[in-house]
Image (cartoon, helix red, strand yellow):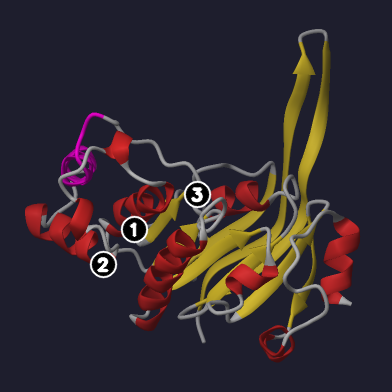
C-alpha cells in the first residue's frame, strides 16, 4: 500500500507571551507519521497536544521548524502537489452568502475547473442540498462543518485532512458528518483526521494514533479499538489518558 504523506522528525514551536516576556513553546517534538493510501488514519489527543499543528504541516499550510514531509512519494522539497485538501474545525465563510454562493465564490477564487457542476457535486456529497439556498450565517453547526468539507472537496482531492470534524456537534450533526466521511473513504479518498475522543472515530478509522506532548505515543491496533478498550468512550484529558489507551 502506497504512502501518500510521509512525515519524519517534524518539530514545530511557537512564540508565546507578551512583548518583553516571550517564550518558545514546543508543540511537535519529532513526529514520524505515515498516511497510507485508502486508509482513514485518526490522530487522537487532548486539546493542546499538537493535533491541529500536525495536520496543518501535513497539508503544507504550515512550515515545520525542521523535519521532512513527502507527498505521494515525491522527494524534492517544495509545496504540496495538487490532491491535498484541508478542512479545519472552524472554516472561514462569508455569512451573507448562501451555501451555493459560498462554494461558487471559493471555486472561482481558486480557479478550480468544473464550474457549477463541481459545486453541485460538492453540495450533493456533503448532504447540503436542503440548505443550498440558506445563508451561511443561519446554518446549524453540523451544516457549517459539512460546508467546510464541501469546500475542501471542490478540488477533487486524493487526500483529505480534517481537523476535529466531529467536535462540538450533537448526535444528529455528528452522525451526518460521520456518514459523509465514511462515504468518502468508500470512494477511495484517503483521510487523516484528528479527534479528542476515541469513540467518535471508532466507526471510521483504519488506524488510531495517540498524540501527547508533541509526540506520537503509540498506535491502537484496529482489532483492539473496534472490539472496545477501557475508557474508550471518555475524552482524553492528558498524557496519562493517552497512555491508558496505548498501553
Quickly name the residue at label 2. 125
The earlier-in-sequence mark between 2 and 1 is 1
Where's residue 230, x and y in %? 83, 78
Disc nearest the viewer among 2 and 1: 2
Question: Farthest residue in the left direction?
Answer: 116
Whether residue 76 is in magenta: the answer is no
Q: Depth check: give the residue in front, 213 or 195.
A: 195
Quickly name the residue at label 3. 60
Q: Main secondary structure of the magenta part?
A: helix
**Residue 25 located left or right of residue 81:** right
Marks 2/1: CA–CA distance? 20 Å
The earlier-in-sequence mark between 3 and 2 is 3
Residue range in magenta is: 96-109
Where is residue 217, by image quadrant? bottom right
Whether residue 189 appears in this view of the structure is no
Q: Are marks 2 and 1 in contact (CB under 8 Å)?
A: no
Q: Residues within 10 Å of mark 1 (few under 14, many from 20)?
A: few
Dot 1 falls on a residue whose secondary structure is loop
Q: Residue at x 66, y 87 (%)?
A: 226
Where's residue 242, x and y in %? 83, 64
Amino acid at each position: 500500500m502506497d504512502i501518500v504523506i510521509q512525515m519524519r522528525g517534524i518539530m514545530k514551536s511557537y512564540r508565546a507571551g507578551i512583548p518583553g516576556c516571550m517564550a518558545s513553546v514546543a508543540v511537535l517534538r519529532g513526529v514520524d507519521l505515515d498516511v497510507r493510501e485508502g486508509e482513514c488514519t485518526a490522530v487522537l489527543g487532548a486539546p493542546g497536544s499538537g493535533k491541529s499543528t500536525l495536520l496543518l504541516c501535513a497539508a503544507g499550510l504550515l512550515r515545520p521548524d525542521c523535519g521532512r514531509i513527502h507527498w505521494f512519494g515525491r522527494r524534492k522539497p517544495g509545496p504540496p502537489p495538487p490532491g491535498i485538501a484541508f478542512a479545519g474545525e472552524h472554516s472561514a465563510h462569508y455569512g451573507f452568502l448562501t451555501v451555493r454562493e459560498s462554494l461558487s465564490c471559493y471555486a472561482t477564487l481558486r480557479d478550480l475547473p468544473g464550474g457549477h457542476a463541481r459545486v453541485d457535486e460538492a453540495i450533493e456529497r456533503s448532504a447540503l442540498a436542503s440548505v443550498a439556498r440558506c445563508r451561511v450565517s443561519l446554518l446549524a453547526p453540523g451544516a457549517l462543518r459539512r460546508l467546510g468539507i464541501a469546500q475542501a472537496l471542490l478540488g477533487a482531492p486524493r487526500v483529505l485532512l480534517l481537523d476535529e470534524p466531529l467536535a462540538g456537534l450533537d448526535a444528529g450533526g455528528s452522525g451526518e458528518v460521520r456518514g459523509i466521511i465514511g462515504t468518502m473513504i468508500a470512494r477511495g479518498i484517503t483521510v487523516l483526521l484528528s479527534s479528542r475522543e476515541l469513540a467518535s472515530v471508532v466507526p471510521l478509522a483504519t488506524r488510531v494514533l495517540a498524540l501527547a506532548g508533541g509526540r506520537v505515543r503509540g498506535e491502537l491496533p484496529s482489532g483492539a479499538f473496534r472490539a472496545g478498550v477501557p475508557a474508550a468512550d471518555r475524552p482524553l484529558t492528558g498524557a496519562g489518558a493517552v497512555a491508558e489507551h496505548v498501553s
